[in-house]
Image: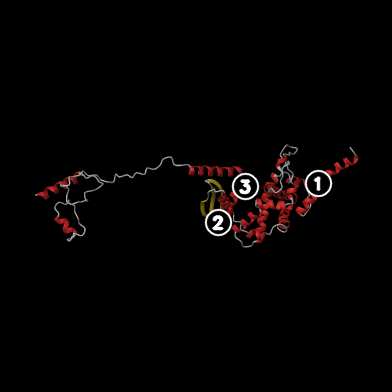
Amino acid sequence: MKVNDIIDRIRLPFRKEKELFSSLYAILGFYPRNIEYYKQALMHKSIRKRNDKGKPLNNERLEFLGDAILDAAVGYIVYRHYEGKREGFLTNTRSKLVSRDTLGKLANEMGLGNLLVSAGHSTSHNSYVEGNAFEALVGAIYLDRGYDACLDFFEKQILGKYINIDKVAFKEVNFKSKLLEWSQKNRVRMEFKMLKQKTDDNGNPVFSFRVTLEGIEGEKGTGYSKKEAQQQASKDTLQRLKREPQFVEAVFTAKTNRTKMEEEPAMAVPDTEQNQDFIIEHEHQDSAEQAEPVVVKNHPESQDDFLAKRSDLVDYNLSDISHKEKSREDIIAEAEAVAFAEL
């Protein structure tokens, strides 16, 4: 091996580390003190690297730490920026700023994805992986320089260069419409089921809704209005549809079963013959013996006078028709009444 080749191989690690320092400075606005934290923040779990003690060496633990620090730092920034705004607005704004989608886009814009180390898997434009790396980076900053450095990083490097906090806060993304559009396009039945309605400690109404797709439970959302709760449920359900193929498969399996049942023909054909059992049949009499028909309509006398003169008409009394059985006392009383009437 030539001397120049040996020198290049010796220089290579130093050159790579120098490039990493420069790249991190462009992202962070300062040079790292302990580069090892940042190297670990850029290690995807797919590389399956372990430390001297045999424990996995990747960015998952730093991601956990960074997530907590990011919530606190962004919460404080939002609280200070929007003086007098109610808790619901502040929570909603913070959620938008630290959402996986926002962090993924930030990491991509900052070039963080190009620094990620993985086992040959492309992380380009993968907002989920890049968003995790962004949180891990915040965890590395916290260990390297403390909480104030994390606060300055997000306030000066992120809000100062990449995000307009006011546009994020007042931007209304209609996730419900997006989910409805997806459902209609795929002919999937979508419903919102209200789980509960209560009031918080300040007497404000709080609503909770869950999305169902073809009867399969989606995500639930809570908010200070029905709209806010449904928006949150829709957003989380959309994210689940993107991340969980099993969920999508369950929804379309339920749809297939439903449409199959609706398309199955009925085996039994209804009978077209009408039931005539409502007609009372009488024995036919000879024409000479048939009773003279009663014609009441347009009779010159009144109906009551006319019926009173007809001795051959039966007096129909419905008072004795009852669903109750007659008691022994009732039967005796009726018999006595008849007996006395004949005297």
Residue 309 seen from this side: yes
Label 1 sits on a secondary structure element that is helix
Judging by the rendered image, the residue that carries numbered circle 1 is 17
Amino acid tagged 2 = Lys
Left or right of 223, for residue 138: right
Question: Which disc, if any, is residue 227?
Answer: 2
In the rendered image, residue 66, in percent from the top left (x then y), is placed at 69, 49
In the rendered image, residue 109, in percent from the top left (x then y), is placed at 72, 53
Of circles 2 and 3, which is in front? 3
Amino acid tagged 3 = Lys
Left or right of 314, for residue 200: right
Amino acid tagged 1 = Glu
Judging by the rendered image, the residue that carries numbered circle 3 is 242
The Cα atoms of the two marked residues, 2 and 3, are separated by: 23 Å
Q: Nearer the viewer, residue 163 or 176?
A: 176
Left or right of 265, for residue 63: right
In the rendered image, residue 142, in percent from the top left (x then y), is placed at 72, 50
Label 3 sits on a secondary structure element that is helix
The Cα atoms of the two marked residues, 1 and 2, are separated by: 50 Å
Report the residue at 66% width, 60% height from top: 167
